[in-house]
Structure formats: C-alpha cells, structure tokens
Amino acid sequence: MLFNTLSAGGWADIDKVVDELWKVISLRVKDNKTVKGALIQSIDTVAMNRKKWFQLVSYCHQLITQYKLKEITATFDIAWTLKKQKQRALDLDTVNGVKLSQLGAKKFGKKLSLKDQKPSEHRVGKNVTGRR
C-alpha cells in the first residue's frame, strides 16, 4: 500500500496516515471501519512478509494494537470522516463554484443597491436631479 512514503514515526500520526490512505482512490468511497480494517490488514501483511526483521514485525504489531484501541478508533473515524467531508466540499465547489460565486456577487450587489436607495427614499420621492 503506502508503506514507503511514511517514516516510522509517521505511522503514529493519524492525520498523516489518513492523508496517505486517501491517496488510494478505491478507499475513498469506503466507510471508516473498512478503511481502518484495510490499514490493519496491510500492516499485518508487512509483518508476515518480514518475519526475519524482528524490530519491524514488533513495530507492526504495536501499530495494530494501537489502531485497535477504542480512543484511536474514534480519532481515526473522525479524521476519515473529516477528510471525506472536505473532499465532498471541494468537489461541490468545483462543480458549483462559479455559480455560487456569481449568486453571492449578485446578492451582495443587490444589498449595496438597496443601501444606496434607502437615503433617497427619505427625500419625499424626489432625487437630486429633480426627476421622478
């Protein structure tokens, strides 16, 4: 998966792990539990394939234990959900960005026009040039 991109310390940082997992496009549509399961399975696979490297295997098992903790699971779930929501917002901005910006500008322009008109309404229906 993504084991060559993170340092050993990076695996303890959930935000970095979530960012790396997000690079796997097929995982983007998965729920928190499925993604965390894929992560744990990948770490376990590394440990199984590197049995001769005791330190690496030990570290992998520590990571698996850490990611199974209730507090870490909750934190991972929040981080993954936020990542998905951020991407959804970016996607909506890409699709609707121009339209939303234009609507906002029009609405702001109308508010400015209304502010400009209010003082002239207090002049008993006459504007500065004397025309109605």
Image: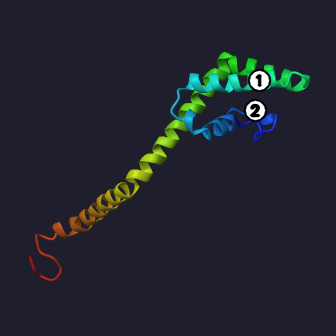
Rendered-image quadrant of the N terminus: top right
Residue that numbered label 1 is attached to:
63
Residue farthest to the left? 132
Q: Given the image, on which type of amino acid does mark 2 rest? A: Trp
Residue located at (69% from left, 38% from top): 16
Q: Which of marks 1 and 2 is nearer the N terminus?
A: 2
Residue located at (36% from left, 54% from top): 100
In the depicted structure, whether residue 127 falls above or below residue 10: below
Q: Given the image, on which type of amino acid does mark 1 rest? A: Leu
Helix, strand or loop at mark 2: helix
Label 1–label 2 contact, CB within 8 A: yes
Rendered-image quadrant of the C terminus: bottom left
Residue farthest to the front? 49
**Residue 69, position as x, y percentages in the image:** 69, 17
Residue farthest to the bottom? 129
- What is the count of numbered marks? 2
**Residue 78, position as x, y percentages in the image:** 57, 29
Helix, strand or loop at mark 1: helix
**Residue 15, position as x, y percentages in the image:** 67, 36
Is 36 positioned to the left or the right of 29 in the image? right
Alpha carbon distance from label 1 to label 2: 8 Å
Residue that numbered label 2 is attached to:
11
Q: Does the rendering let one see residue 122?
A: no
In the rendered image, which quarter is residue 109 located in?
bottom left
Which numbered circle lies on residue 104?
Answer: none
